Amino acid sequence: MRRLLLLLYVSLPLLFLSGCGASLAADRHDAERLLLIQTLGLDSGEGLYRMSVSSGLGPEDKPALVMSTGSHSIEGAIADLQNLSPENQLFYAHVQYILLGESAAKEAMNDIIRWVDRSPTLRMDTNMLIVKGTAAEAVVGSSEASTDITQRLESLDRQARSTGWTIQTLRDVATALSQGDGALCMAVQTVPAENAVFTEDMQSDAVVPAGYAVLGPEGLVGFLTPEQSLGAALLTRDTTGLLITVAGNTMELLDGSARIEGQFSADGAPEGVTVSCTLRTGVLETSRERELTPDQLDAALSETVAGWVADALRQAQDAKCDFLGLKNAVLRSAGARERWGGGWNELFSTLPVTISVDGRVDRSYDLEEW
Amino acid sequence: MTDERMTRKQFAAAILVSLLSPLLRLLPQASVSLAGRGAYLSALPAIVPLLVLALILESFRRHMRPGEGMGGLLLRWLGPVAGRLVLAAFAGWFLFYGGFILRSGAERLVSTIYPSSGQDLFVAVTIALCLLVAMGTLTAAARTAVLMRGGLIGALVVVLVFSIPNMDPKELVPVGWSDTVPILLGALPMASVGAVAGCFSFLSGYVRPPDDRRWLLGSMTLLLVLGAVICASVVCVFGPKLTATLTYPFFIMIRSISLLNLVPRIEAVVIAAWVGADFLLCTMLLRCAHEAIRTIFRLPPPDDRRRGALRSGRFLLWGEAAVIFGCSLLFDMPPWQMRLWSNRYIPLCSDIVIFGGFSLLWLVTLPRRKKERRGGL
């Protein structure tokens, strides 16, 4: 009898486990009704959030479910989306891409980071992209029966990786912004169907990369041009695979790194920053054969890249936003924190920066032997 | 009592698994918010207060009679009135802290996995299971701890290994001499976590001789190493400032892990596994409180041959479990308030009771110890 009572006592909690009773487990999910949201777009403006979602193509090319609605809060928009699709249970645990429209990136960047932090379903390492324009246009406008925004972004992601670019995650951006500096985030823009495709059965807009968006502590600051973005990519990470076009020659970056150091006067006072880049590239395509000797090509590569790097640095100083991570790079060297004191932020916008690029083109023998 | 005595190895496992609960509640956030990127170095200065506490407890343990725990020793040394008052204070703290552990464990589980559910259900189920185990033998609980230790540390290792791709070791530097004070401050939460082990001295009467201290030292060393590694890894993933502002940085880090791109979203399994640590700590606190209260009323120790019997003072366990449940209801508060209690008030109270309480008792009982050492008693 005692054993029976003990068994009943131990079994009692099982009644409360999810799946044993819908009324007791509000988090119970019916797998057949789950609709996995794969791309989530957010816009904001005039006190409203517009959320646009796409579920991705279903099995047997079932068209994606694409919806968009506005509310006074993000959670309110999520609730409204659920009401728009009562036959499905929208599930956000597997979101692959978060798209932020310009307005949301400008006004609500920090709110969105905090929302994802608190969300029990969304992940901080979800890929994030800033849309030039609105995220709703990208999510809704680029979807049709045979494709949707997720498929387009997956393709863009693959292409970006193969050419040395990286799509930042929300964590990357949040980490950089938390340091009080700026952050870089890949930008995309929609291209109207008539400008992008030439088959009549494709009606939706294309989504193409648009360089980097610059985020400051308060939100979106601006966008870098593709060339400035190349300069920024070289400065912010050791990278390979980027495509660089110099004097009609298209090259693949085989190896690239940047060293950033503080300069000090004889009495130890900070004077400026030195940026030294080392590049090794390989020619992939040449259209002006034999115009440049290998030495001239090396010099042209160094000069062109130095210009891009200088442009990116100027943009950072003009915006007073250290999105290139100069501060971290300089202050990491031994004793630098003590020498700079707390004056980095005041000095940053007027800091003299010396740039040197050592570019070398490998596999250029074919230019001589053409 | 000899029927349910644990080996030193099992006792050390029970302590380690129990401390994994406050370890991930406080770390890395509390240490990183004080020490910044050098939080992983805070494990070193944390050794000092923990070593002092260990020496104090060891000096008490040397005077315990066979089968006697901290409760019996204090009652014998401080006399019936002062001894009972001190034991009542300790018992009160154990029950209050048990209530907090229950609620914070439920809050972590609910807020990270079951956001639409209530916490009371989880609290009720956990305290029911704690009561069931506390009614039985401590050996059974300690054997469970040995099994859980492998599982939980294995889960930690898997999480840390699979987080490596997301880590940037540059976040750990620079750390200079100017970080000395923040790093020392960052040691406070780590020491606070380790000090919870002091509660377990009330159960030392249930540990079999010989007095091999290697397991206990090993457990505490492993705890500090884990604390340092957790701080370092989370800082490498999120950077020091974001780590200090995130709600549960370690569990948010787990959310991003995918096992070889085959099994994503493993955080539910890891967070659910951590309920085991909460459960064990709560069970041990329930037994610690029971030991103190049993000693106050001079009741015999529980006898494992009569699990359901209410004699031998076992009926008190029901009341103590009810008090823990009642205390957990006091912590039914908004998340921001819970975080304040979790990171500030509870560690502070714990430090006062454990470090302050035992240090004071050590001073007060100094003449008595000298007398016993001279062979007077």
Image (tube, rainbow, N blue to C red):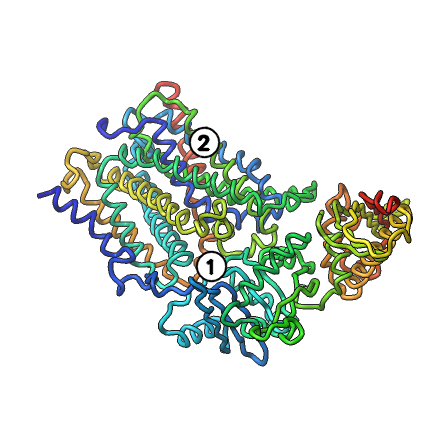
What is the number of callouts on the image?
2
**Left or right of B357: which side holds B27?**
right
Looking at the picture, which amino acid does disc 2 mark? Ala
Looking at the picture, which amino acid does disc 1 mark? His
* Residue B155 % position (x, y): 43, 41
**Left or right of A11: which side holds A120?**
right
User: Residue furthest toward the bottom?
Assistant: A46
Q: Is residue A224 visible?
A: yes
The residue located at (59%, 59%) in the rendering is A155
Question: Of A232 and B364, which appears nearest the observer?
Answer: A232
The residue located at (48%, 33%) in the rendering is B222
- Looking at the rendered structure, the secondary structure element under dot 2 is helix
User: Residue furthest toward the top?
Assistant: B375
Mark carried by residue B54 = 2
**Left or right of A336: which side holds B274?**
left
Mark 2–mark 1 Cα distance, whole angstroms, equals 47 Å
Question: Of B333 and A160, which appears nearest the observer?
Answer: A160
The image quadrant that residue B312 belongs to is top left
* Residue B292 % position (x, y): 29, 40
* Residue B351 % position (x, y): 46, 44
Q: Quadrant of the N terminus of chain A?
A: top left
**Left or right of A155: which side holds B269?**
left
The residue located at (68%, 52%) in the rendering is A164
- Looking at the rendered structure, the secondary structure element under dot 1 is loop
Q: Which residue is mark 1?
A: A94
Q: Chain of mark 2?
A: B
The image quadrant that residue A344 belongs to is bottom right
The image quadrant that residue A81 belongs to is bottom left
Q: Chain of mark 1?
A: A
